[in-house]
Image (cartoon, rainbow, N blue to C red):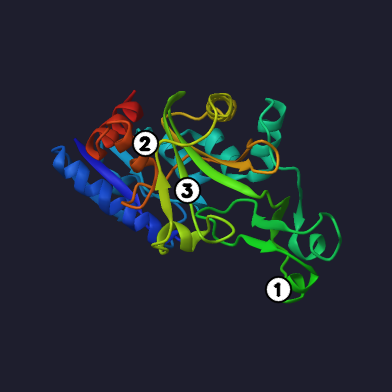
Amino acid sequence: MHITILEGGDTEREVSILSAKAIKKSLMNLGHKVEVIDTKGIKFLDKNKLNTDLVFNALHGGIGENGTIQSMCEIFQIPYTGSGVLASALAMNKVFSKRIFKSCGINVPEGVSGKEVELLNKNYLNFPFIVKPIDGGSSIGIKIIHNPQDIKGLKLSNKEVILEPFIEGREVSVAIFNKKILGMIEIKFSQKMYDYEAKYSNTNTKYTFPIDIDNDVCNQIYDFAIKAHDSLGCKGLTRADFRLDTNNNLKPYILEINTLPGLTEHSLVPKIAKNAGISFDKLISMIIEDALN
């Protein structure tokens, strides 16, 4: 089969290239003909350059994850990996997705959204709280605000952000494949949160199986993960991230659901799959089969 990998792009570029490299190696192991297209600076795909049986979307963030690439593939009638247009757009927008999650009974951190310069010049939340872009990924652009002095040191912009209370606790991620749980992993890191450095640079970050939590909490996390996947209309592979409140009996709060989780050697989903007895090549095969169906 001829498979085209979309990589790079303009957001989360380094992670995307690493994902694409691992995917390409796996696809070649599986006997596929592989082509890689770097979408940096590209706003629209050229159908004439997509003479392919399948688009494997290895992009993260931006047009690769917000429904734009998905809509182009739909128009071109080319099968593609990951969730569809609407699910991708909803999952990418933390404000919209949180509203849907909350309506389904999933615990979400309460917060406010708006322009950064306006929100941070008013006392909306008690310290500490988190500032994050409404549509970012890989924890890029996330800041913890501990006191007013932290705000004074920032160069505020008119970009849309969301403010949420900082939840003191543990962080876990759940891999879902078509409404089925593949497993859960706990991330232990030295920083206050699992940021970009902790994800891709910090050798002190640890990942643990199994997770030392009560069955009731575990089942609630799994229930929330499936509901989140289903409520947005996701398909294929997703990853749901949670914070467990250590001040409230490990009450789980969903942070986001990722419709294009990383597939690098450092990424969470391949670790979860491996722990479940699913090799990387098998995981890639599952993703391809799902896209073609």
From mark 2 to mark 1, how far is it between C-alphas?
Answer: 40 Å
The crowding category of the residue bearing disc 2, from other C-alpha atoms within 10 Å (few below 14, some 14 to 19, many at least 20), is: many
Q: Amino acid at mark 1?
A: Leu
Identify the residue under disc 2: 80
Could you tell me residue 225's position as x and y percent? 54, 30
Q: Amino acid at mark 3?
A: Ile
From mark 3 to mark 1, how far is it between C-alphas?
Answer: 28 Å
The crowding category of the residue bearing disc 3, from other C-alpha atoms within 10 Å (few below 14, some 14 to 19, many at least 20), is: many
Identify the residue under disc 1: 154
Identify the residue under disc 3: 187
Between 176 and 4, the one lying in front of the other is: 176
Q: In the rendered image, which quarter contains the C terminus?
A: top left
Label 2 vs 1, first from the N-terminus: 2
Between 55 and 184, the one lying in front of the other is: 184
Could you tell me residue 203's position as x and y percent? 38, 62
* Above or below: residue 191 compared with residue 180: below
Q: In the rendered image, which quarter contains the N terminus?
A: top left
Question: What's the mark number on residue 75?
Answer: none
**SS at mark 2?**
loop
Q: Nearer the viewer, mark 3 or mark 1?
A: 3
Indicate left or right for 106 with 239 as reference: right
Could you tell me residue 178's position as x and y percent? 43, 25
Q: Is residue 236 visible?
A: yes
Identify the residue shown where x is 62% and y is 47%. Answer: 169
* Above or below: residue 286 compared with residue 202: above
Indicate left or right for 138 with 143 as reference: left
Q: Nearer the viewer, mark 2 or mark 1?
A: 1
Could you tell me residue 177's position as x and y percent? 41, 28
